[in-house]
Amino acid sequence: MGNGYAVVDVETTGLSPGHHHRVIEVAVVHVDPSGRRTDEWCTLVNPRRDLGAQHVHGISAAEARRAPDFAGIAGELAARLSGRVLVAHNVSFDLRFLRAEFARLGHEFVASGLCTMELSGRYLGASSRSLAACCAAAGVPMGTAHSALHDARASAGLLVRCLDRVGDVPPVRLDLPRTSVFAVQRSSGHASEQHFLAKLVRLLPRVETPRGDEYLAVLDRALVDRHLSAEEQEELLDVARALDLGLPEVMGLHRDYLAALAEAAREDGVVTADEEADLRLVASLLGVEPGEVVPQRTVRLSLGDLVVFTGEMREPREVWENRALSAGLAVKAGVTKKTALVIAADPDSLSGKADKARGYGIPIVSEDLFAGLLGELTGGRA
C-alpha cells in the first residue's frame, strides 16, 4: 500500500464547516503497510473564532491562543498526509473539515479514505458505531475521548486489526510547500462526559446503511450536551445534504436513534426519572413523538423505603398506612428527597406534596398501583 496509512482525527468548533466551524486540533498517526506504527504528530490549531463546546473537547482558549492557525500548519499536515491512504473513524466527518480548511487556502484536498467505523462493524464485530465501543469490541486501548491524538491512536489500532481485509484505496494527493511549524499540545487530558446521554451513546447499535451511521455519528456529537442550537440544527441539515439523505430517511434515523437510547436505558431494568426526562428531551430535539418508545420509569419498592400519602383515598388513609407499615415500609407525613414514592387519590394531584414530589423527581402513583407494588414486596400477602 505504497507509503502506508495516515490515520487522522480532528477536533472542531462545531459540526459543519459550512457554518464557519473550524479545526482546533489535528493528529496524524502513520502506519506502514505491515501494520507497524511509525510516527505520530499532533497540534492544536487557533481557529480565530470561539472554541464551541469546550466541555466536550476540553481545549481552553489560553491553549488555542498559543497555537498556529491552519495556514501555519497546512504545509506540515499536507506532507504528513500526501501519498498515504487517509484513515479516520467516521472518515466523512474529518474529510469535510480537511477539504474546507485546505480550500480556504486555495488548495484542493483529493482523498477518499478508509473508515474504521465501517471496518469495525464489518470485520471486528462492533455492534455500536462509537470509537470507544469499536475499541472495546476489538480489544484496542482507548485513551481520552475527544483528544485528537488519543482518538487517532485508537483508530490506528482498529485499522491494524483489519489490514488483511483492506483493499486498494487511492492515497491523498496534496502538494504544498513544507514549512517548519511549532506544534502546540494541549496541557492535559480532560474529564470524559459522565451524564446519561453521553454514556448511552457508546451503546447505540449501528444502522443498516453506512450513510446513516455517518449522520448519526455527527448527531452523537451534537447531542452530547443535550442541546441543539439553531446553528447545530442547520449544520445537521448540511451533513444530511452532504450524505444525500432525504427528510424521510433523516426522520427514520431520528426515530431509530431514540428507540436505541430507550432500549439502552431499559437494559438494567430500571428507567430513572432522569433517564426518562432525558429521553423525552431528546425526542423533542429530534422532532420525534416519544409515543411508546420512551419507557415510563419502572417503580419498585424495597423494605424500609419512605412513602407519603396525599389526597382523600377511596379507603381511609389509616388503612393504607397500616398496610404500608405491615409490608415493611416507613410512612412519613412530608415529602423529602429521601421519599421513594407518593401515593395519591389522583396521580395528577395539585397538592403541595405532589408538587414537591415532582420537583424532586419522585414517582406519584394511584392506590391501585400502590396495592400492586405492595403485593410484589410481600409476595402477595399485602
Image (cartoon, helix red, strand yellow):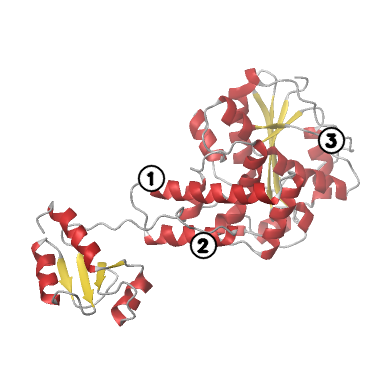
Q: Position of residue 357 (x, y in %)?
A: 32, 73
Above or below residue 26? Residue 170 is above
Disc number placed over residue 110 in the picture, else none? 3
- The answer to whether marks 2 and 1 mark residues whose Cβ atoms lie closer than 8 Å is no
Q: Position of residue 27 (x, y in %)?
A: 69, 40
Q: Position of residue 226 (x, y in %)?
A: 55, 60
Q: Which residue is mark 2?
A: 281
Residue nearest the observer in this picture, 114 or 98: 114
Residue nearest the observer in this picture, 90 or 180: 90
Q: For the residue labelled by badge 2, is the local secondary structure a helix, a strand or a loop? A: helix
**Amino acid at circle 3:** Val
Residue positioned 14% across, 70% down in the render: 320
Q: Residues within 10 Å of mark 3 (few under 14, many from 20)?
A: some
Whether residue 274 is visible here, answered yes or no, is yes
Residue positioned 71% across, 46% down in the render: 245
Disc 3 or disc 1, which is closer to the eye?
A: 1
Q: Which residue is mark 1?
A: 267
Q: Image quadrant of residue 61?
A: bottom right
Give the number of marks.
Answer: 3
For this view, does 343 lie left or right of residue 200? Answer: left
Mark closer to the chain start, 2 or 1: 1
Q: Image quadrant of residue 223?
A: bottom right
